[in-house]
Amino acid sequence: MENEKRFYNRIKIVLAIKRVKNKELAKYLDVTEQTISKWTTNTNQPSIQEFYKIAEFLGVSVPELLELPENNK
């Protein structure tokens, strides 16, 4: 069975490295903390536009927020 997820985000990892709380990111993006929680656990994914806003807020590039599964590299 093929892996259904094509990529994973690293938002949780980058938030920890930057010492930014989910609440701060939620406020910046005007979304709920529950939404951020779903993104950080890869339950849901942000839109492309949201990825760009997250990257801007955290001072990283969009590719730094993404991780391809080993078998898709």
Image: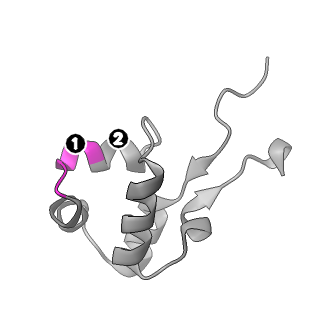
Above or below — where is 7 with respect to 12? above
Q: Are marks 2 and 1 in contact (CB under 8 Å)?
A: yes
Crowding at dot 1, Cα within 10 Å, few <14 / some 14-19 / many 20+, comes out as few
How many neighbours does mark 2 have within 10 angstroms: few (below 14), some (14-19), or many (20 or more)? few
Q: What residue type is labelled 2?
A: Lys
* Image-based side of 17 in relation to 36, left or right: right
Span shown in magenta: 30-35
Q: Which mark is residue 38?
A: 2
Q: In which quarter of the image is residue 11?
A: bottom left
- Give the structural element (helix, strand or loop) at label 1: helix
50 horizontally vs 66: left or right:
left
* Colour approach in the figure: one colour
- In the image, residue 48 sits, relative to residue 55, either above or below, namely above
Q: Where is residue 1 in the image (x, y as percent from the top left)?
A: 79, 17
Residue at x 42%, y 37% (from the top left corner): 44
Choose between 16 and 5: the one closer to the eye: 5
Which residue does the numbered mark 1 point to in the structure image? 34
